[in-house]
Image (cartoon, helix red, strand yellow):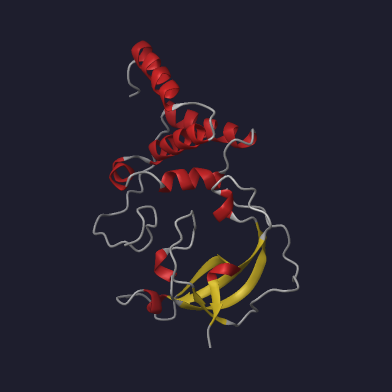
Amino acid sequence: MPAVHDRGGWPTDDPIDREEHEWADWERQTQSLRTVLDRKGYMNVDELRRGIESIDPAEYEASTYFERWSLSIETIVIEKGLLTGEEIDERAQTLRDRWGYPS
Amino acid sequence: MGLPIVSTAATPGLAFSPGDHVFVKDMTPPNHHRTPWYIKGRRGVVLEFIGMYVNSETRAHGDSGLPELPMYRVEFEQTHLWTDYAESPSDKLWIDLYEHWLEQAE
């Protein structure tokens, strides 16, 4: 059984969703954050991919494209000691209290 | 998000030449790798050496990814990869693979 990200050739009867969609603000921010972390030498694209591949398969399936990016960025910045999980959770809670959940 | 090609000039010491028949190693190392499951253990033909590339398999784990490794474009018969392949029997699949994923086939 291939790993969850190793997707080519998996059988499915579901049609491919080719709909374009508008980027949400948080998706743009996620992309920007990844770029900044790369430019500053903290995280390269191969590390992004490895972080995505390490997501629990059930969570991977339940996540959108940029949610997977976000999970991977969290994994890598914690691994590199830039932030702790607690710091990220506290900051997320503060922003949630102030702004609510993103739509 | 492509990786930079360092050189496409012929490099001494390459293990494979265009036309060589090769098998893709059937291995699943625990580290990051980009060789898809459906060509592992499959036979193909080397089309060309396409350059020296940083090693994404070590770079994914915090390493520099150096030294660069030889990369080859390898051709597979779609009908060999998919038993129920229903399109043209002459269809090919091209995939770029690092040298260390290949072994010589007779």
Total labels: the figure holds: 0
Apparent side of residue B21 relative to residue A96 in the rendered image (left or right): right
Q: Residue at x 72, y 57 (%)?
A: B6
Q: Report the front residue among A56 and A21.
A: A56
Q: Report the front residue among A32 and A91.
A: A91
Apparent side of residue A36 relative to residue A49 in the rendered image (left or right): right
Name the residue at the bottom extreme.
B106
Rendered view: B48 above or below A61 = below
Give the x, y percent position of residue A51.
45, 43
Apparent side of residue A77 relative to residue B72 in the rendered image (left or right): left
Rendered view: B44 above or below A66 = below
Name the residue at the left extreme.
A13
Q: Report the front residue among A99 and A88.
A: A88
Give the x, y percent position of residue A76.
49, 37
Q: Report the front residue among A34 and A23.
A: A34
User: Quadrant location of residue A39?
Assistant: top right
Q: Residue at x 49, y 73 (%)?
A: B24
Give the x, y percent position of residue B14.
69, 74
Apparent side of residue A25 relative to residue B59 in the rendered image (left or right): left
User: Quadrant location of residue A85?
Assistant: top left
Q: Residue at x 28, y 45 (%)?
A: A58
Give the x, y percent position of residue A1.
31, 62
